Amino acid sequence: MKFNLINRKILTLLKVQYSNMLEYRVEIALWAISGIIPFFMLNIWTNNNLNESINISDVLLSRYFLSAFFVRQFSVVWVVFSFEEDSLMGKVSPYLIQPLNPFFRYFAQHLAEQITRFPFALIIAFFFFIFNPESIWIPNLGILLLSIVSTFLSFLIQFLIQSIVACLCFWTEKASSIERLLFIPTLFLSGLLAPVVSFPSYVKSWIYLTPFPYLIDFPANLLSGNETNISVGLSMQILWIFLLFPLFKKIWSEGTKKYTAMGS
Amino acid sequence: MVQNIIDVRNLSKSFDISSKKPGLKGTIKHFFKRQTKSLKVIKDISFEIKEGEIVGFLGANGAGKTTILKMLCGLIYPSEGSILVSGYLPFRRKESFLKNITLIMGQKQQLIWDLPPIESFYLNASIYDLDKFEAKKRIKKLSEMLEIDEELFIPVRKLSLGQRMKSELLAALIHEPNILFLDEPTLGLDINAQRNLRKFLQKYNKETNATICLTSHYMKDITSLCKRVICVHEGAISYDGKLDLLLKKLSPVKEILIVCRSEEDAIKLENSGFTVKNKIKNEITIKIENDLITSSLKTILNNFDIEDLFINEPPIDEVIGKLLINKDYEI
């Protein structure tokens, strides 16, 4: 019953946030375009024949980076910045006294933005295939579904990590600075700049113990048809969600006791 | 017997405040070693509020009025003491408690800026578990009470401040809360919008018997809505009681301007034992204690040839202003 009510609330939030996002369609198109780092990286890798060192063909590599682009489009999170601003400006106050955790609003905002991004991401992929026709592939339905699930789990992990950092706003006013510390490992270890497989094996074994490779590397490998252990990857994603969620709940409950409702 | 809906006992709140000296030296020192001190902004206050009461919180800027409201609605955690609102500890923010209250801050908004208010209303309705039919009914009822109609379908960013405030009120009241916490609800509104808002709050209170806790710097809000006021000075309560009584205490005498038919009558009146403020020809201003007004006026009208008289009420802003700026003011 309670689960249904929360679902109904999220669905309404999603509808409203989607309407809101459609007001910003130009900005969203630009954000989608701004996420083309994987294509730059693909260019660097192929022009320097770096893929030969890890035994991945040009075609598989281009599929990997296109998948990385897609995974990134649907897992990018900015909750720490939104929450920090709302917290400093006192905008969180009215939401705190409503019977729904304010993070659901941000969650719906992100999902709505992803839905709005989708057509733009498809257009970018279309142009990618025009310039790289040899990379065209159609993943089988099962893999496609698993990739969608895995991308959503990646989004959940990132959302939880950033929400935990966002809650630090209750102690320090600039939690986004802490997020920037996380940005570096996210950039290098997630697979956005290079597939994790390209790291030396002793480094790789450590990287796979962190949540970072499950953010982009694993779902991108899954979608692009590269070799990957699906059950281990999905289990690790679920494990990280189970570890991060109680931590978020704890830090949220302690943090709200510190809330001073600044600016309101 | 009307029950207490809010019960506050020995409530205190302290904030840690860091201070920084000006200049580069101060900035560097502040970077390496923060100097923080604990500032007690609410000091051991106690009061009760009965169901259906409208209570005004009065105080200068920074006196602690808003902090009290924030603790009452569960937004911030008290440092010491206890608060019970409708039988709940507000800070626990139980769903059933949150469904009973609302907080409206004049300078803050919860409506989604780029969408028409109606979208925010349906969103709030869903957050408060109202079905679409019920939500529609309540939106209709409240929009009639607030006299808004077409504005519901115009993006919030294009509404005037008054229209926005009405929409904010509708969004905040869609779940029909029993307790309203209003922090400067008329801030920035023009006179007509202020009057309409006050009329609406009176009507809402009458129809639903909701309890209203209100802070405002506009004395008209307080005088037309609140029978009872709680004066807060530097975090402590300096007065808690009827507004009439407070005004009587702060301004125990009234000034009466009497226009006599002749100057002789004015001289006779001047020498008849009343406290005279001034006399110009046949016009004389005397001061009379509030309790003696009726009997004194009777005497004057019976014994002197009076052409006209005016009773001057001291402006309420001036009277309350005295209370707010003078911490040693005796009440």
Image: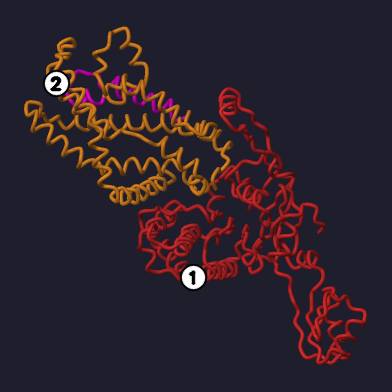
Q: Dot 2, how many residues are within 10 Å of its Cα: few (below 14), some (14-19), or many (20+)?
A: some
Eyeballing the image, is A49 above or below A161?
Answer: above
> Which shade is chain B?
red
Residue A226 colored in magenta in the image: yes
Q: Which residue: 16% across, 39% down?
A: A123
Eyeballing the image, is A153 above or below B45?
Answer: above
Residue at disc 1, secondary structure: helix
Residue A97 at x, y percent in the picture: 53, 48
Residue A224 at x, y percent in the picture: 17, 25
Query: For the stretch drawn in magenta, what is the main secondary structure?
Result: helix
Circle number at residue B145? 1
Residue A115 at x, y percent in the picture: 26, 43
Q: Which chain is orange?
A: A
Magenta stretch bounds: A219-246
Pointer 1 with pointer 2, Cβ within 8 A: no
Circle number at residue A60? 2
Residue B124 versus residue B27: which sits nearer the camera?
B27
Q: Which residue: 37% across, 48% down?
A: A13
Dot 1: chain letter? B
Identify the amino acid type marked 2: Leu
Same chain for the residues under marks 1 and 2 in the image: no
How did the renderer colour the structure? by chain
Give the Cα separation between the discs numbered 1 and 2.
Answer: 65 Å
Residue at disc 2, secondary structure: helix
